[in-house]
Amino acid sequence: MTWTTADSAHPVLRCADTVLAAVREVDRVDPAFMTTTQKRTALLELARARAQVEAVWLRVLDSAGDLAGLTGERDAAAWLAAHARMDRGTASGAQRLAGGLAHTWQATGAAVQSGEVAVAQARVIIRCLDDLASVGTDSRGVPDGQGEPVSAEVLGLAEARLIELAALHSPGELRTLGGKILSTVAPEVADETERRRLEAAERRAGAATRLTMRRRGDGSTDVHARIPEALATRLKTYLDAFTAPRTAAGPRWTPGRGIVDPATGIKLPFDRVQGQAFCALLECLPAEVMPLHGGSATSLVVTVDLETLRTGLGEATTLGAPADTSRITAGEARRLACQATIIPAVLGTDSEVFDLGRSSRLFTRGQRLKTALEHPTCRTIGCSVPATMCEAHHGRDPWCRGGTTDQADLTHLCPWHHHRAHDPDYLTKRLANGDVRFHRRR
């Protein structure tokens, strides 16, 4: 962009020019050759400089409504998204933050401008203050008749205290402290206000609850959800129950490396482990607690040819909602056949239904309890995952080869080892005492 003489005379533009020139001077400088003292100083000083530059940028953004008018854009955020290669949501968030600092929470804005508060901290402070200011009002800011709104005096005290705390705490810590700030600045109204704030937050969370699924076409599906925080905490607790056991046989925590797959020695990202736990949770949902679907109990049908089921060579098809199908391997079909929510539809010659497995094919709760009392953990040698977290497996004679649902045939395997039992890359050996051992095929 070419600046005119009048433009370049403005202090803000001279500032931008100076910053860009200074950055270009070190563009080809390799920081690897800096001493540790120099790196420490550079990181801290550049963080301060970055925050100060962003503060100036936000002040300019707040005043750029006239620029949007010249080009016919809806607002400054729309102009910024179109010309600065920014996402519209990011630009809109920056515009809201700029407006809040300049007009609503001016003490925080002044602290950002002076470098006392970082922009990331200011974003948290404003979110906390906006939540407090919304207590006692509806979505339009009109009193809802449920109680008195938080007074301007109390809001001012809360803002001042959060600015003080920013000198000692990170944005995440500020977020926690901000949730209880009234207990510090106005304890006489804290309990009632907190109750109404939580009720308002729950109403907003309920209205914002969403879940979407998009098939990627590569055998996986993206699931994106927004749910109330209390339910998210509940979900995390359930997932932790699947990922918490650190055994020698399953994924385990290794100091300095994180969660490692013992079969491959490869470090597993935590989000992958959580995803596997979510899949295990879905497979453990009992059919009896699900609502009726189409006049019958909710269930998943796995259709597979008899020969495919016996040999493990080929594929099967799962049928959930009407016209909602997906293909899986025969090994996965055999594993799913052990689960209480699966109906295996086995096809003989000419695709006639050879057998339709029902509840009699599945181990009962009493059978599982008896086996758990006799052996309270996964039957894999070295695995200590509790039997209550395990899946029922036809261990002696696979169901697809004529195995029965007798007590003696029930083997408890944790989700990890149940996958190994149906994985063609592994050999499964059942010992005389009922324990199981796995060996990777060469």
Image: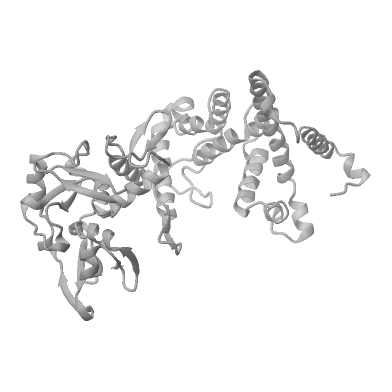
Q: Is residue 80 left or right of residue 156?
A: right
Judged from this view, the residue extending furthest toward the bottom is: 350
| Residue at left offset 70%, top offset 28% | 114
Q: Nearer the viewer, residue 78 or 260?
A: 260
Residue 208 versus residue 244: which sits nearer the camera?
244
Q: Quadrant of residue 62?
A: top right
Decide: is 170 above or below 329.
Answer: above
In the depicted structure, whether residue 21 falls above or below residue 199? above
Image position, residue 233 (x, y; %):
35, 42
Could you tell whether 425 is left or right of 26 in the image?
Answer: left
Q: Is residue 125 above or below residue 278?
A: above
The spot of residue 260 in percent (x, y) is 37, 37
Q: Is residue 409 left or right of residue 239?
A: left
Instruction: Give the left or right position of residue 5, taking residue 81 as reference.
Output: right
Is 166 above or below relative to 219? Answer: above
Residue 146 shows in this picture: no
Outermost residue, front direction? Answer: 442
Q: Nearer the viewer, residue 285 or 280?
A: 280
From the top left corner, tell me how far across and down residue 315 is, in percent. Answer: 30, 67
Residue drawn at x 15%, y 60% is 399
Residue shown at 47%/42% (left/top)?
135
